[in-house]
Image (cartoon, grey):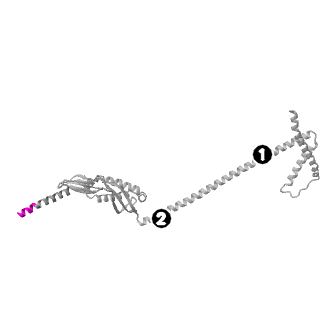
Amino acid sequence: MFDFLSELAIVPIIVVLLILFMLFKAIRIVPQGFEWTVERLGKYTRTLKPGISILIPLLDAVGTKNDMREQVIDVPSQEVITRDNATVQVDGVVFYQVIDAAKSSYEVADLFNSILNLAMTNIRTVLGSMALDECLSERNRINNDLMSVVDEAVEPWGVKITRIEIKDITPPADLVESMARQMKAERDKRAEILVAEGTRQADILRAEGQKQAQVLRAEAMKEAAFQEAEGRERAARAEAEATRMVSEAISEGDSKAINYFVATKYLEALESLATSPNQKTLILPIEATNIIGSLAGIKEIFEQTSAQDKLKPVNNESDI
């Protein structure tokens, strides 16, 4: 009888434990940033979002716990042969994010290794289609090509490739030395070109300066010639006016005008003889003393001419 009562007392405890077990199986709390798949009798039924969810005990079970945050895969270094048969060591990183938890759980067996191998093979494909110089200078193009190809390949798995970055491209040591020599030769070439361009520009500027100086010199000579011609013209007009005045005086019977004209020409002839470059000794004829008398006549002619010029305005006013 005691044993029977003891068995009856155990039954409520078992029932309580069973209820607690059922509640434990039925209530699921999904952390933030995760999504869990639910399988009912082994078949996918739905996806649990972050928060508390209720399952049917003994029928529903959690299948896969998927991390929906962005994750990174380190691509190990590998040898790649470029289009121009250069061997380089290449490594990189892949950033991806699970978009569809169900597809990432049931469309691919090992998501991590699948993305890693896909990235490595496409790195060899993309870099193998490019020359070495392109591989070293066009990182953005390589990254964009890799991301577009790999992202398209993993789309059926419910995964989004956010970035693919090539970390390092290392050519062989002998190739690096050859590239350094080539770069030095190219810089020396550019330096020589710059020196030649500088010399050429200096010669051009010097020639332009000489040309401008010649133009200015020619303009100065032209101006001097113009001034000289103008001076000769004025002298000729003055000579003509003097000759006219002498002619009028002669016509009026003034002998002093004749003396003035002869004395002027005589003095000009003596001046030309005295200023001759080969002239060392100048012998004057006895008649040269008569020039003094002619000078007195010249003075009187000038005085008469000045007096006439002063009287002209007076006569004009009387005529008015």
Q: Is residue 227 left or right of residue 247?
A: left
Check the image and name the residue furthest to the top.
320
User: Disc 1 marks which residue?
Assistant: 230
The answer to whether residue 4 is magenta is: yes
Q: Nearer the viewer, residue 99 or 278?
A: 99
Q: Position of residue 210 (x, y in %)?
A: 66, 54
**Circles 2 and 1 in contact, beta carbons < 8 Å:** no
Mark 1 Cα shell of 10 Å, populated few (<14), some (14-19), many (≥20): few
Q: Residue type at mark 2: give it.
A: Arg
Identity of the residue drawn at 43% across and 65% down: 176
The answer to whether residue 106 is magenta is: no
Say if residue 319 shows up in the picture: yes
Distance from label 2 to label 1 (Cα)? 73 Å
Instruction: State the SS at label 2.
Output: helix
Magenta range: 1-8
User: Disc 2 marks which residue?
Assistant: 181
Q: Is residue 264 left or right of residue 142?
A: right
Quadrant hosting residue 141 = bottom left
Kindly report the secondary structure that dominates the magenta region of the rendered protein.
helix
Looking at marks 2 and 1 on the same chain, the residue that comes earlier in the sequence is marked by 2
Identity of the residue drawn at 52% across and 61% down: 189
* Residue 51 disc label: none
Q: Position of residue 171 (x, y in %)?
A: 41, 63
Which callout, 2 or 1, points to the residue nearer the camera?
Answer: 1
Mark 2 Cα shell of 10 Å, populated few (<14), some (14-19), many (≥20): few
Which quadrant would the N terminus be assigned to in this image?
A: bottom left
